[in-house]
């Protein structure tokens, strides 16, 4: 049994869902592990992680609109020093994931056919986001 | 230290919360592990995992009604090729869990007294759902 | 490779977000691990875990108000035997986390600069909450 740690840093091209599955599998492919557990942990509070539908771009647009409605930019947040998109960013992050663990079985990350791993950028002006990685297994 | 991987496939009897704790503990009981970490990962984007109250069926009905109100079937989703319950299914999945890790200590999965592990089926017509399992420990 | 299990029990001073990062790092500091994965699992269904902004108290107050609006106390929950704050507590727990895994790299828990680990107490009268801990690594 052994473990491997590291990180990837990604700047999303825009606010919203950005597919990072290729970045994650590239890191994993160099590891030589066949069975194990991969954990991703995003080190930020205004961006998050989400596993979502990877086939239909329209589904991702609906998802972004849903979160924009659910945790909208409003006039009346108490915390507004960092701009009107900051507090909604924290709320959308709280409603999704800071961490995801995905089993690796028979050399394959166990994502379903229609699942992709997404960086969910919640700020209007994206900045570099670091995701810590931990892999344990053989 | 060793690990065990596998999967269980379950078809919920209906839309909503379906207790899979017995299925999970049956898989675990055959493993011979006493201390470790069990990870469940659902390989779908229109069903999810949730740990919830296992005592009061009324609490589960309230929870289902809450998610039905929060992410309702609507006329105006852009993604509607797979029926009116498809996009809300993705939204309800995004708001709950794709993955859960539960410590195993002294031979006992560390669920609280009132906690059960639920498959949360979001489609009106349930289909078989596969949950990948990973166990590491001793 | 080795593992360590345990638990911490915390009573929040009031409903809302309570920073438990010091309790978690105190447990971790005694472990002697430098690389690994720490998992926290809360054994309750009316309190939850959340990683959030640790700098601005106003952000946490906005977050509490947001969840109070999103899953409000209402007259019409079917499950109301345990008081008006019980069903909203389950809903707010379902929308946040029961479990968090955080990588430990180079002796440092990989929380970002602005991230803290919070116990999110959803009942008006806080009670002791037990969080099971699992650490694996070296």
Image: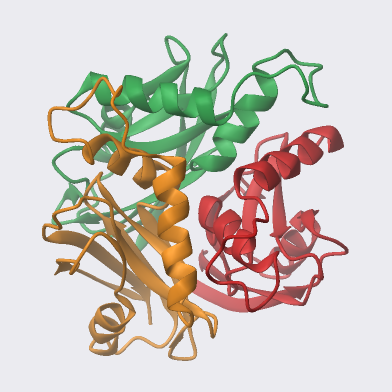
Chain colours: A red, B green, C orange
**Relative image position of residue A52 (x, y in whole percent):** 68, 41
Residue most toward the right? A13
Q: Is residue A38 left or right of residue B29?
A: right
Where on the picture, by quarter, is residue A59?
top right
At 75% from the left edge and 16% from the top edge, which residue is drawn? B75
Q: Point out residue C72 in the picture as x, y percentages from the top left corner.
A: 37, 39
- Residue B37's image quarter? bottom left
A31 or A55, which is in the foreground?
Answer: A55
Q: In this view, does C4 lie to the left or right of C72?
A: left
Residue B133 appears in view: no
**At x 23% / y 59%, what residue is drawn?**
B35
Question: Where residue A114 appears, x then y in whole percent?
Answer: 73, 34
Asked which quadrant contains residue A67, the reply is top right
Q: In this view, does A52 lie above or below A23?
A: above
Locate residue C11 relative to residue C18 in the image: left or right: left
Residue drawn at x 31%, y 39% is: C88
Q: Is residue C75 visible?
A: yes
Indicate whether C80 appears above or below A108: above
Closest to the observer, A3 or C58: C58
The residue nearer to you, when weighing C99 against A16, is A16
Above or below, comparing residue B77 to residue B29 in the picture: above
Give the residue displayed 16% in from the left and 51% down from the top.
B107
Q: Which residue lies furthest to the front in this view?
A: A76
Q: Where is residue B68 in the image (x, y as percent from the top left)?
A: 51, 23
């Amino acid at each position: 049994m052994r473990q491997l740690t590291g990180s990837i840093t990604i700047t999303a091209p825009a606010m919203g869902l950005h597919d990072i599955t290729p970045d994650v599998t590239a890191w994993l492919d160099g590891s030589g592990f066949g069975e194990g557990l991969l954990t991703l942990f995003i080190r930020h509070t205004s961006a998050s992680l989400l596993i979502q539908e990877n086939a239909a771009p329209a589904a991702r647009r609906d998802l972004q609109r849903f979160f924009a409605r659910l945790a909208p930019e409003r006039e009346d947040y108490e915390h507004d020093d960092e701009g009107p998109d900051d507090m909604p960013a924290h709320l959308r992050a709280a409603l999704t994931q800071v961490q995801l663990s995905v089993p690796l079985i028979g050399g394959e990350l166990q994502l379903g056919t229609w699942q992709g791993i997404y960086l969910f950028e919640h700020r209007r002006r994206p900045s570099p986001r670091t995701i810590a990685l931990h892999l344990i297994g053989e």
